[in-house]
Image: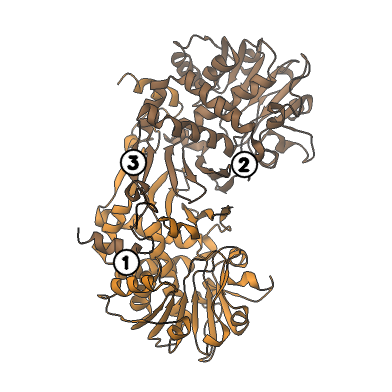
Chain colours: A brown, B orange
């Protein structure tokens, strides 16, 4: 093998790995609010080149306990996918409801170039996506957000909306007061005014933005029609798989609905409650100026968020770009890379002699 | 968190990782022929419980240079998937044509339990599958195999057929004599009689089994009709993606064709040359005694191999079972596992204080 055809064979075998510990260090080095805002820029940039992406609904394996999903996409140059589970009963058993990891690879030769934890990164990118979308859809000068459901996603959402949208007050509610207490504690140094509320209705009072993020795997009614007045932006995070919704259908019928990728959202989102031809607007069209977002002060806008593969791709792209900046990764010996690509067996055989 | 609900939170965050170096050590500890035979037993056992598996055609991202695929499956208790690329032009550029890695996870909580290189493991399981199938389909007392295409898969196939089927002689041919020389060298201590041949026709002469394993991404004709007499078993490995075949259509029409999973093989296998309703037999049916395999000495049997997710699942299951036996793995900090699953943000925040 000459240097010109294979300049660096040993390095090719190695793939940078960002562990949970590395990811926490990256977050704490950059700062969570700044990092969310930077990821939001990557997400927005990728929504603005929507046509370049291979898009497919996620590949889901459902069981009675939950779901395991693979979410692949590609921009023609880089391929990415995320492995993610959703197991609502996990929390009570001491496990995370959602864990995830992801990979980026080169399209031209298929070699992985990044392997990363994505449990933390998914929380960051979900919050970043919500905030980017609210920038386009929420009432101008929104200052108060209700957060219904104070689980693992809660603080990330609050910080994202402060940093990207300019929210100053979050009004928290959870059926479990301990979850709200946890969020109040974690947000105490955030610069946000944090208000613990006694009901979902109480939390929504006076809010321009209502975020729902609960984890029951069922058709729940977290928001009822009477809680939602005119001129509200609803950021609905938790209705994200078949049989799992959070909003009363009447709210949907009063809202203009915005989605990431309709074929996926119709299966997984709040709109699984509606007929398949109910009109929805694709977010990329709003961002690209090809469709209208908020058109009046009294309009109810609803982001029916289910999470899409391009957002994970954007987040992984961002992490790859931070590797040199932060140095928080290790190299994994993931790829067999014999000097002669046809001599895989010889490589294994010779390893026994070393 | 009480011990009863979360007995071992820190261990939950860790996932065993089998690197390329670890896999080579596992192969060399167990011995390649024995390991292939053991994997073959896992593959056969999983074919015999075919109904238990979630089956879906692989999810492929095609580009002009090649393909990147995700191959998921589940037996209801364990979920597995493989990432694999196929880039025929890689070899000339000093990269592997195929690289792969895989994951096993618990269905009940979605947590990964094994992350492994699969470039080497795929070579082992592909050979193991071919050999298991030949056990059912090849003529009794087959002793001579032709190997057309002497690339990365060649030696693994040869060893598999020696160990599982009882082959004593391999007749090698490749359009590149250097590939054949490499295989002759690597098999010199294998106990096989190894014959380098000057043409595909020469290689096939006197063989009861003909294995084709070439890598061009095109419809090639590696075997022409006149090379294949009666009473032959053809093990066709290389025709494994759309637009890539190795056999002349006339051979297919003279053969009884056996496949792993028809919906995938009709897209990717040799039978993409045939009408969609051309009869094929599923391998699991033959193994379970529900369909006939070889019925006469003069019959031509064809295993139209494309590789199926359950085979990777079987191979990963095998590797997981070797972890304690061999000790060749490291623990990766892949899963965020806060003491309170809802307190992901607090975990990140507190990490900065450590």
Helix, strand or loop at disc 2?
A: loop
Residue B104: tell me if it is visible: yes
Relative placement, left or right, of B177 versus B89 is left
> On the image, numbered disc 3 is attached to which residue?
A331
Helix, strand or loop at disc 1?
A: helix
Residue B339: tell me if it is visible: no
- Pick the residue in front: A8 or A283: A8
Position of the N terminus of chain A by quadrant? bottom left
Helix, strand or loop at disc 3?
A: strand
In the depicted structure, whether residue B250 falls above or below residue A95? below
Q: Residue visible at 53% across and 29% down?
A: A125
Co-location on one chain, circles 2 and 3: yes
Q: Which of the numbered marks, if any, corresponds to residue A53? A: 2
Q: Measuring from the top left, give residue A87's x and y in whole percent.
A: 51, 39
Q: Measuring from the top left, give residue B50's x and y in whole percent.
A: 52, 65
Residue A302 lies in quadrant:
top right
- Pick the residue in front: B247 or A100: B247
Position of the C terminus of chain A by quadrant? bottom left
Q: Residue visible at 50% across and 57% down?
A: B87
Q: Residue visible at 59% across and 44% down?
A: A58
Q: Measuring from the top left, give residue A159's x and y in whole percent.
A: 52, 17
Q: Count residues near mark 3 (Cα–Cα under 10 Å), then give few for <14, some for 14-19, many for 20+.
A: some
Q: For mark 1, name the chain.
A: B
């Amino acid at each position: 093998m000459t240097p010109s055809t294979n300049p660096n064979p040993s390095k090719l075998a190695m793939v940078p790995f960002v562990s949970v510990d590395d990811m926490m260090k990256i977050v704490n080095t950059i700062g969570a609010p700044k990092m969310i805002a930077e990821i939001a820029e990557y997400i927005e940039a990728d929504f603005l080149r929507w046509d370049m992406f291979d898009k497919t609904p996620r590949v889901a394996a459902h069981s009675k306990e939950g779901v395991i999903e693979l979410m692949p996409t590609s921009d023609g140059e880089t391929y990415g996918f995320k492995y993610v589970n959703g197991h609502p009963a996990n929390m009570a058993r001491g496990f995370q409801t959602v864990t995830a990891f992801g990979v980026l690879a080169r399209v031209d030769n298929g070699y992985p170039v990044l392997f990363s934890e994505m449990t933390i990164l998914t929380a960051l990118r979900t919050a970043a996506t919500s905030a980017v979308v609210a920038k386009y859809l929420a009432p101008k000068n929104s200052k108060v957000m209700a957060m219904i459901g104070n689980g693992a996603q809660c603080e990330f959402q609050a910080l994202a909306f402060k940093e990207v949208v300019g929210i100053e007050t979050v009004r928290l509610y959870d059926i479990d007061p301990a979850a709200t207490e946890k969020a109040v504690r974690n947000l105490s140094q955030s610069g946000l005014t944090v208000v613990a509320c006694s009901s979902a209705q109480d939390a929504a009072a006076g809010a321009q933005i209502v975020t729902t993020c609960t984890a029951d795997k069922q058709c729940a009614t977290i928001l009822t029609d009477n809680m939602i007045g005119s001129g509200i932006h609803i950021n609905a995070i938790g209705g994200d798989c078949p049989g799992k919704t959070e909003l009363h259908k009447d709210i949907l019928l009063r809202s203009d609905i915005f989605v990431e990728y309709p074929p996926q959202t119709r299966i997984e989102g709040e709109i699984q409650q509606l007929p398949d031809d109910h009109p929805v607007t694709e977010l990329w069209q709003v961002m690209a100026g090809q469709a209208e977002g908020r058109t009046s002060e009294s309009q109810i806008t609803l982001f029916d968020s289910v999470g899409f593969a391009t957002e994970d791709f954007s987040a992984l792209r961002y992490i790859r770009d931070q590797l040199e900046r932060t140095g928080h990764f290790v190299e994994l010996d993931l790829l067999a890379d014999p000097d002669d690509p046809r001599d895989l067996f010889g490589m294994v055989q010779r390893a026994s002699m070393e």
